[in-house]
Image (cartoon, rainbow, N blue to C red):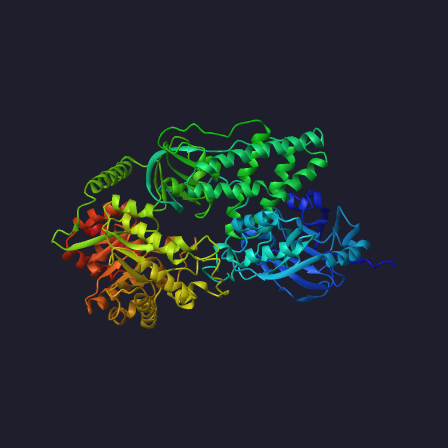
Amino acid sequence: MQMSALVLSSPLKGWIASLSEVPDAVFAGRMLGDGVAIDPLGGELVAPCDGVVVSAHRAGHAVTLRSPAGAEILMHVGLETVALGGEGFEPCVREGQAVRAGDVLIRFDLDLLAQRAKSLITPVIVTNPEAFEIVRRDQDVAVEAGGFLMELRPVASAATAASSESKSEISRAVTVPLMHGIHARPAARIAELAKSFAAETALALGERRSSARSPVGLMALAVRHGDAIQVLASGADAEAAVAAIVALIESGMGEGAPVRAKATSAPAPIAAETPLAPAALPADGVVKGVLAAPGLAIGKAVRLASSDIAVREDGQGQASEEAALLAALDRVRARLEANASKGDKARKAILSAHLAFLDDPELLGQAKSLIAAGKSAGFGWRSAVRGYVEALRALGDRRMAERVDDLIDLERQVLRALAGEDDETAILPPGSILLADELLPSQLMGADPGVIAGFATARGGPTSHVAILAAAMGIPALVALGGATLSIADGTALILDADGASLRVAPDAPALEAAQTALARRQAAKAAAKVAAHEPAVTKDGTRIEVFANTGSVKDALAAIENGAEGSGLLRTEFLFLDRQAPPDEDEQARQHQAIAEALQGKPLIVRTLDVGGDKAAPYLPIPAEENPALGLRGVRVSLWRPHLLKTQLRAILRVQPQGQCKIMVPMVASLDELRAVRAVLEEAKRELGIEEKVELGVMIETPAAAVTADLIAAEADFLSIGTNDLTQYVLAMDRGNPELAARIDALHPAVLRMIAQTCQGAAKHGRWVGVCGGLASDLTATPVLLGLGVTELSATAAIVPEVKARVRALDMAACQDLAARALAQTSPEAVRGLVQASLGA
């Protein structure tokens, strides 16, 4: 019986071209399927047949239909148009909507796209070629919307094959609980697990599917938190494979639910692959960027550009090309493993992700298929990597786009290994401030950190791997400065103020002198503070301020003592609970707390009870999916949700000797009832251990509710400690995990200061002391304001404790109180910082 054909009409008016002519490796290489391309002459995309909308991209530039017969047709208006973030597009349909041939799917501004897009050419793709083949198509002709485009015919064996496959393939549905969906790290873990089974395994999201052994393919699925996916497998151990992969995903892999709900607006534009064009410098010579790693640097510009690696297209035989590729991969793998074994934690994590990408079977498979078609190893590898680079960019997801750098980095390393060349190692003069379009992780790791004063890139993001490396290496860095960065000539004098998010180009003598003075002053003050680090912090008029350090390990505690901290004002116990499959038992916790207490040499240790949920998750605490996890099960709410974990933790803390060194602090409290509930568990634990002495129980003020009811909470809490990081995001209604808002989230906002003032006033009514253990305690500009508001204890990062103590010694309480009163009347955090600067020269 002959199966009926499906005729597709043209969705656009324009010129029909071969898909091979599309200047994009994904489409031209038919990685998404076969089809044609249309150069449009009109601004409407219409349905090429009757069908149902199975996918409508949130950026408005692409839509996929499924015909009644099951053919899936992707129409992608223009190239790299996802970067427009929806600008110029008017989607006219939604997912799940039934349409008739000729119905308008998308309206678009043809003139705007002509100016902004890489190309107007619009691929029309059959994305399930295993089920439908193209038997006839028009090409190299003009066409009207609705005119003939191509004819499809079901593949005769497809239905039989699908039926056969469905009998042998098993599947299970799972709702993804991971905070950022399946991105690089989870994808690598899933792939690693999948490779341990003989079964063929896959993940499917809707109609899209990827081998579970391919971390890059899994990332390209763009699976997000809350998505319902299928885990599929076929083969002898298929059931075990599916069960294991489902269990891994459901565990959350230590990532939990997202800090914020899914975005409903168009995504932020993502940089295209082509380098940015140089742009004119601002008239004042100051280029603004985004903080990637803090600090101040003065140096000379060094333009860092990666030389292009030429590869020949034609191979010299399949066997020799495959052998060359495998040898190059082995060489790069050995180098990555050697570097990972001797680096810090950040470096190890990044290199581990690179190793996972290097072992991706889909990448290798794509390269081998091209080699088999007569291409060279270098051409095959570059084409395979670039195909996935384009796919990840097209997702419109900033986190995924930042992983593109890792793939490009690996592409270059393998190509150099194929060419028999060593890593590129730039010989840099001392005081170099590196300038680049984008900086690759291997370029930074391969440079001598002793000569790099800082770096600034035209593109990149604050959560990219190179930004994480910079922070770990203590190198001031800015990203996303734009094309003006590329106009700066080598050798130009620069002032890189990462904290101020600015790069000053060719500063005049006064500006340069001021920066040098500021840098010298910082270095001298730091040295002097270190010398006096173990002296008490007492203001000029005799007010004693305790300066503690935040800790999360024995190493942190030792650093705290070395830097003159008078104890630990915050022990983050999460280090015991995260990145493991089961919670620590009482004995393990007690041993760890005891070791930290001993490292503090008997000084006070304030232990915060478990603070997970939101952006911190434990695999054994499968917190149900939440619409807004930042407002869901977090902090004390998790402890009261699982009181057996709370009691075990409290018992472990109570076992620390000597009795009384440890105080206990409860996070994310919003009401007095929560404190009372924790105290009841504490009293029960004390009775079980035969402890009769008073154990101080305090509260972290991190919610507006706690701040405005501080007088009620202080009536029963032994002390209050303000967590300014969370308090700020809740007061300002700004997610501190959102890089677009990062520059606007400042705890010196008058609204936050008013919450701190109200907390201090409430505590004073009951004679309770108030500390600050959030990021504001480490901000020297904030110190006089906090003291003036009534804070008497500061718990900062260990490294800055000497400077905080020195800052306190330079202050007068009466002046601080006057300054704080004026700060509360300001209208912005910038105004507050300016006020402090003008009043105290901070």
Q: Is residue 670 above or below residue 435?
A: below
- Residue 217 lies left or right of residue 743; in this view the side is right
Q: Which residue is nearer to you in this view: 815 or 511?
A: 815
Q: Which residue is nearer to you in this view: 107 or 305?
A: 305
Q: Is residue 239 above or below residue 716?
A: above
Task: Report the residue at 50% width, 65% height from top.
Answer: 624
Q: Is residue 80 visible?
A: no
User: Residue pushed farthest right?
Assistant: 1
Q: Which residue is nearer to you in this view: 377 or 459?
A: 377
- Residue 464 lies left or right of residue 390; in this view the side is left
Q: Is residue 834 above or below residue 685?
A: above
Specify the quadrant of the image occupied by residue 311.
Answer: top right
Q: Position of residue 357 (x, y in %)?
A: 56, 43
Q: Position of residue 731 (x, y in %)?
A: 35, 64
Task: Report the residue at 66% width, 41% height from top.
Answer: 366
Q: Is residue 698 above or below residue 509?
A: below
Q: Position of residue 253 (x, y in %)?
A: 50, 54
Q: Which residue is nearer to you in this view: 820 or 512?
A: 820
Q: Is residue 17 visible?
A: yes
